Image (cartoon, grey):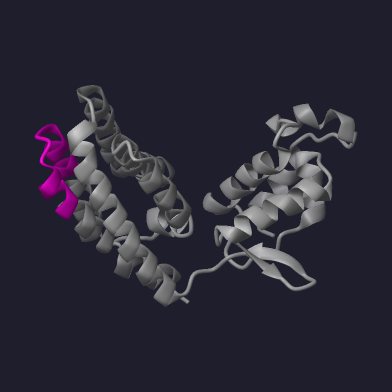
Amino acid sequence: MSFAFSTLLYRLPYKTNMNRIATVDGIQRRYLHDEVAERLRELILSGELEPKERINEIELCERFGISRTPLREAIKILATEGLLELLPNRGARVGSVSQAEIEEIIEVVAGLEATAAELACRTLSDAEIDAIEAKTIVMGKAHERKDDAAYFTLNREIHEAIMAAARNATLSNIYSNLSSRIQRMRYTAHKTAEQWQRALSEHQEMVVLLRTRDGEALSRLMREHIRGKKAVISAAYGS
């Protein structure tokens, strides 16, 4: 388990009385395993739990103040998403992605985002474009001050905002489930100065095309924008 995770674990309060779990760490009693799955998903996507790291059930149960039953149900949920791998008689570990899988997933995600971009241009409001533009500006400033955490968060929020603007629940669900497998890789893989500038320029162009509602051009740009990350992700994380 990573040092950051272990340190944070012992700083958080927890309660051992199972009758009081409704208030533990913000987790609600109703649909407890779904809430636990969401918290565990956040730990994985943020990088606090790293690829191939074993899941320590005892420590997580203490952290969330829950029994093993909802935790194991949550583990099963994340296993179906590919975020965790179940090990026969040995619990679970954070999933890893092979080189071939990275290439396949990025290609599909590129297609999904290209479709979302075209649909979004038909439906999104001026207010939504304003919000995306504002995030793009702030993201650029985060890059200038080398605030990687803020940059990557804003980058993800921009892509998710365009996906949401497509107003297509089926598309969004497929995208969410698939993109989650490479989310951390996608937004934290290191880039050269040239690649950074290209990414920023493409985000600025996205705003222009959203303003003109040019769905066809934005769809092409989005597909190439995502494909452009394939080599960077593969070099950093491919196995």
* Residue drawn at the location 31% of the way across and 53% of the way down: 112
> At 75% from the left edge and 49% from the top edge, which residue is drawn?
71
**Occupied quadrant, residue 80:** bottom right
Q: Is 83 positioned to the left or the right of 168 in the image?
A: right
* Image quadrant occupied by the N terminus: bottom right
Q: At 23% across and 30% down in the image, what residue appears?
A: 124
The secondary structure that most of the magenta stretch takes on is: helix
Residue 46 spot, x, y in % from top left:
53, 49
Quarter of the image for residue 36 reads top right
Q: Can you give x and y, in whole percent of width and height, for residue 149 in the image?
A: 43, 44
Q: Is residue 191 above or below residue 46?
A: below
Q: Is residue 87 left or right of residue 117?
A: right
**In the image, is residue 167 part of the stretch drawn in magenta?**
no
Tell which of 19 and 202 is nearer to you. 19
Residue 190 spot, x, y in % from top left: 36, 60
Q: Residue furthest top?
A: 127
Among the 4 quarters of the image, the one containing residue 121: top left
Q: Residue at x 76, y 40 (%)?
A: 64
Q: Is residue 147 visible?
A: no
Q: Position of residue 73 (x, y in %)?
A: 72, 51
Residues shaded magenta: 204-220
